[in-house]
Image (cartoon, rainbow, N blue to C red):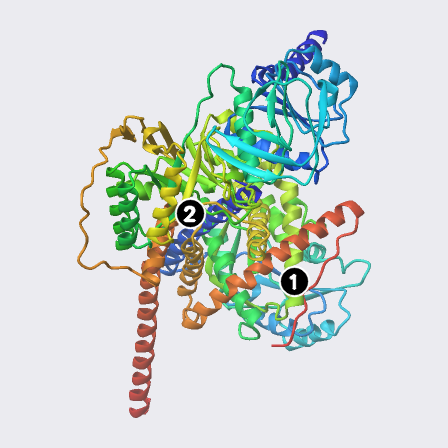
């Protein structure tokens, strides 16, 4: 009996400890301490921090300012706390006793961690990212809290009258960002740059990620001639580009789809990358397997026509849920776009995406005058715009001296259903074990394509989509029934005819009998 | 896969599996009918056994004279059978009607047993036990009070029973006398032919199994003596007795040439009560016999127990699941993501149902026509759905009866004058 209880206790202990061990093995890049007030500046800033952490592949642990903290396994602490909140004394002691670098946004908790000074006057902020982009803003506030000791500037300045102070400066332990505006695209880019520099362990500048130009949401029914003009313009401008194509699940043989894919194979042969847009999910309870199945069908449809998407484009919110991430697991490279509150699955507030090791490409913030190289971003071009307007946009991007990168120069891996694609940075592409040369071969078209619209098309789809075993069973059974019915009816008709004939003969005999007077 | 997917998968597998079984039985039934139609049903006997024809009757004034007159017209040797009508605590003029027929045929063996509410009025099984106590025949034939058997029916049944020692009982076929009374009776007529007669024939063809339908059957007296009569607790005494006959090692055979015409419920409320009683009775029998599924000595009977289990539990559950998911899906509350469930598959299910029933109707002389094609289709979406309601109602009432220890109440099907 004792042995049995002992074994059960051991199993229970292991069951409890093994996940904890696994959890402990996962590195925690940042401990983020913030206030929980949903409408506060800190909470709104946290959305940007979560986004930056996700695209930078940082694993973060989030804690409320009132909660006790554990610093074990952390590489740094980020404080984003509203004014009026204070850290518990124990947390302050823990932070000061540790040797972890601390990044403080705003002045709420700064006084607890380092000597500060308050500067008053008319405030002008100069955001400076990548030492190239500058953006000045006059603030309504007239006081700012700064670190008492001058440290290393991470970029940006605060002008108080004629005096200039670093907007974000680093002392030995504490790095302080003196001012931040939530929901401001320029500040978000600036924060991303500051955090990247703060997290960079070496003396030189951190690695700069590039931008990808993407012709967004290209449909098979877009005019190939117009698309050609756009891509010709991009080639004239000598910029690398990719196209995000919408998924199609049927009618791959239609001439429009063939022409579209011919165009895609052409641009592919000239170095463009193709990205598959994720299926549009309108029902929250759609199963991941169904979405994966649709992706697989769409991927196969394109691959059959010589187009090999290298990445997937999804709403950013998919990266925030287990269900969304489960769909994306087949793609190494994921491009995201911002799509309102379109969350697929239950939103999780920790960064789960970093576990899957994706190459994430976020959407460049619209309306920002500054930019950041802290993580890879996509600039989406609207193909419905006029070609010359697009050219002006591309020239502006070029003149901003942002680094434009080619999707084809990345290593990409795709698993879609039973399909497997591996694309190397040198341009080699292997699809289902076979090396595919991405050369352009003109398509051959039927003289007249039969569309099988209406009933015939519907039947074709029904037969393709239905369960073949059931269909076979029904066809065999019904055929047997039909033959059997025919045999029985013939037999019954024969019997009836025979009975009728017999009756007639009897009547005739009876008539003759009467005539003879019998 | 979500819950709706799992339930749909279960429903699809169950429904198609049962459809496959049904097709299999229909094929067997068809082959048996085809074979039987081509052979002479008569097997003349050197000596015909004495038969007691028992008719339980409770308030059957509207139909009893017609039934008894039909029984008197049997081409079975008149001195070799008796008719015992158990006038079971009737409050109408059944007794007077029976006395009038007795007066018309003073030379015939027509026995009327009138019971009061002390001895009788406790259901068909009890009435049959009363009839059995006065029966003299070595063979017993049972007819419901609303039946009009064809003259040769009894003779064919007895000849087949006596010709094969392995048979414990022989059943005939029953047809709907009031087929054109209402849309409901038209549906019942089709159901009777397709599911009760053809399936029975199929089960006999493949497995030597048949379930006694409660009327138009003959059985050896010694079997009833051995099993101690009919179970008064059973609401469907026919299924119950069939299972006991199987366990004794006898077979029950269907002979389609022995035909009786019976009156079917013409109103939905009557139909609902009758079918609920049948379903409750079958559930009772099923619960009492399910243990034999795991008994290797129970023989082929296990197949029947399994078949009934599939029909009453699997099919009912599957239909409830599929209909609920369909309705919720239409209302937008659930979404099925399973592949392979195209509209064509659904259409094929309808087609199979239609063909399966039309095959049965093709074996009858006046049933195979366009009207039947439409009726079968209409039946699929109306009458077939009512079956689920019946099973759920019966299950609920059985459950209530078990926990409240209510006494079994026999609902007597209301009749009308034809």
Same-subunit check for callouts 2 and 1:
yes
Residue B47 in sight in this render: no
Which residue does the numbered mark 2 point to in the structure image? B340
**Mark 1 Cα within 10 Å, few/some/many (few <14, many 20+)?**
some
In this orientation, which residue lies closer to the viewer: A515 or A131? A131
Q: In this view, does B195 lie above or below A23?
A: below
Residue at the image point whose x is 54% and y is 20% from the top = A199
For the N terminus of chain A, the quadrant is: top right
Q: Is residue A230 left or right of residue A132?
A: left
Which residue does the numbered mark 1 point to in the structure image? B272
Displayed quadrant of residue A29: top right
Q: In this view, does B245 lie above or below B380?
A: above
In this orientation, which residue lies closer to the viewer: B82 or A154? A154
Displayed quadrant of residue B415: bottom right
Q: Is residue A33 above or below residue A488?
A: above
**Mark 2 Cα within 10 Å, few/some/many (few <14, many 20+)?**
some
**Residue B70 image point, x, y percent:** 57, 71
Whether residues under marks 2 and 1 lie with C-beta atoms below 8 angstroms apart, the answer is: no
**Residue B377 image point, x, y percent:** 47, 65
Classify mark 1: helix, strand or loop: helix
Classify mark 2: helix, strand or loop: loop
Q: Earlier in the sequence, mark 2 or mark 1?
A: 1
Residue A172 in sight in this render: yes
| Count of marks, rendered view | 2
Q: In this view, does B365 lie above or below B305?
A: below
**Residue A129 image point, x, y percent:** 50, 30
Q: Which chain carries label 1?
A: B
**Residue B360 image point, x, y percent:** 43, 61
- State the CA–CA distance, disc 2 to disc 1: 36 Å
């Amino acid at each position: 009996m004792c042995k049995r209880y002992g074994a059960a206790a051991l199993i229970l202990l292991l069951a409890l400890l093994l996940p904890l061990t696994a959890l402990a093995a996962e590195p925690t890049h940042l401990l983020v301490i913030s206030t929980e007030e949903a409408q506060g500046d800190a909470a709104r800033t946290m959305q940007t921090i979560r986004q930056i952490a996700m695209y930078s592949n940082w694993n973060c642990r989030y804690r409320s300012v009132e909660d006790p903290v554990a610093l074990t396994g952390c590489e740094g602490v980020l404080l984003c706390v509203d004014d009026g909140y204070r850290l518990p004394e124990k947390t302050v002691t823990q932070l000061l006793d540790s040797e972890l670098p601390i990044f403080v946004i705003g002045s709420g908790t700064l006084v607890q961690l380092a000597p500060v000074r308050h500067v008053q006057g008319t405030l002008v902020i100069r955001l400076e990212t990548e030492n190239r982009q500058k953006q000045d803003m006059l603030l309504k506030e007239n006081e700012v809290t700064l670190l008492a000791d001058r440290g290393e500037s991470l970029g940006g300045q605060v002008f108080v009258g004629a005096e200039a102070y670093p907007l974000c400066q680093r002392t030995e332990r504490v790095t302080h960002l003196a001012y931040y505006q939530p929901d401001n695209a320029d500040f978000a880019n600036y924060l991303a740059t500051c955090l990247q520099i703060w997290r960079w362990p070496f003396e030189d500048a951190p690695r700069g990620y590039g931008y990808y130009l993407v012709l967004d949401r290209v449909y098979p029914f877009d005019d190939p001639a117009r698309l050609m003009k756009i891509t010709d313009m991009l080639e004239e401008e000598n910029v690398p580009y990719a196209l995000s194509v919408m998924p199609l699940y049927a009618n791959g043989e239609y001439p429009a789809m063939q022409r579209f894919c011919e165009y895609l194979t052409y641009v592919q042969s000239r170095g463009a990358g193709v990205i598959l847009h994720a299926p549009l999910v309108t029902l929250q309870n759609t199963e991941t397997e169904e979405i994966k199945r649709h992706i697989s069908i769409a991927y196969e449809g394109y691959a059959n026509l010589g187009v090999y998407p290298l990445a997937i484009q999804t709403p950013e919110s998919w990266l925030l849920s287990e269900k969304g991430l489960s769909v994306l697991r087949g793609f190494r490279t994921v491009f995201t776009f911002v799509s309102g509150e379109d969350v697929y699955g239950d939103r999780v507030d920790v960064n789960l995406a970093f576990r899957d090791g994706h190459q994430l490409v976020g959407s460049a913030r619209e309306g920002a005058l500054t930019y950041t190289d802290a993580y890879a971003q996509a600039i989406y071009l609207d193909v419905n715009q006029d070609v010359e307007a697009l050219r002006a946009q591309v020239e502006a991007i070029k003149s901003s001296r942002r680094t434009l990168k080619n999707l084809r120069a990345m290593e990409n891996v795709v698993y879609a259903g039973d399909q497997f694609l591996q694309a190397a940075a040198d341009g080699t592409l292997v699809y289902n074990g076979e090396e595919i040369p991405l050369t352009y071969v003109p398509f051959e078209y039927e003289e007249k394509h039969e569309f099988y619209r209406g009933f015939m098309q519907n039947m074709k789809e029904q037969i393709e989509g239905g369960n073949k075993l059931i269909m076979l069973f029904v066809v065999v059974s019904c055929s047997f029934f039909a033959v059997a019915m025919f045999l029985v009816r013939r037999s019954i008709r024969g019997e009836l005819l025979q009975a009728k004939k017999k009756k007639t003969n009897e009547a005739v005999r009876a008539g003759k009998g009467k005539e003879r007077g019998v | 896969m979500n819950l709706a997917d799992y339930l749909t998968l279960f429903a699809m597998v169950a429904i198609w599996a049962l459809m496959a079984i049904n097709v299999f039985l229909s094929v067997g039934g068809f082959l048996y009918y085809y074979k039987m139609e081509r052979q002479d049903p008569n097997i003349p006997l050197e000596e015909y056994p004495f038969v007691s024809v028992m008719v339980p009757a409770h308030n059957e004034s509207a139909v009893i004279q017609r039934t008894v007159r039909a029984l008197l017209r049997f081409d079975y040797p008149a001195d070799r059978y008796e008719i015992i009508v158990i006038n079971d605590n009737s409050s109408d003029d059944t007794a007077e009607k029976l006395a009038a027929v007795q007066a018309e045929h003073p030379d015939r063996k027509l026995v009327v047993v009138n019971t009061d509410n002390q001895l009788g009025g406790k259901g068909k099984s009890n009435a049959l036990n009363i009839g059995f106590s006065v029966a003299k025949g070595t063979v017993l034939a049972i007819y419901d009070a609303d039946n009009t058997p064809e003259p040769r029916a009894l003779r064919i049944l007895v000849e087949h029973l006596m010709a094969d020692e392995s048979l414990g009982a022989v059943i005939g076929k029953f047809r709907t006398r009031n087929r054109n009374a209402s849309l409901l009776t038209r549906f019942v007529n089709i159901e009777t032919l397709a599911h009760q007669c053809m399936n029975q024939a199929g089960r006999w063809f493949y497995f030597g199994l048949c379930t006694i339908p409660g009327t138009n059957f003959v059985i050896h007296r010694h079997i009833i003596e051995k099993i101690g009569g009919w179970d008064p607790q059973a609401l469907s005494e026919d299924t119950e007795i069939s299972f006991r006959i199987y366990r004794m090692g006898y077979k029950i055979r269907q002979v389609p040439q022995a035909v009786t015409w019976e009156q079917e419920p013409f109103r939905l409320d009557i139909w609902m009560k009758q079918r609920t009683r049948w379903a409750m009775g079958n559930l009772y029998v099923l619960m009492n016999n399910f243990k034999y599924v795991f008994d290797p000595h129970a023989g082929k009977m296990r197949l029947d127990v399994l078949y009934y289990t599939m029909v009453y539990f699997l099919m009912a559950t599957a239909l409830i699941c599929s209909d609920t998911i369909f309705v919720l899906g239409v209302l937008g509350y659930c979404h099925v993501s399973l592949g392979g469930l195209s509209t064509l598959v659904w259409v094929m299910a309808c087609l199979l149902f239609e063909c399966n029933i039309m095959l049965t109707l093709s074996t009858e002389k006046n049933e195979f026509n366009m009207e039947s094609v439409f009726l079968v289709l209409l039946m699929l979406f109306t009458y077939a759905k009512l079956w689920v309601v019946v099973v759920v109602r019966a299950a609920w009432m059985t459950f209530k009866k078990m926990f409240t220890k209510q006494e079994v109440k026999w609902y007597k099907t209301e009749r009308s004058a034809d």
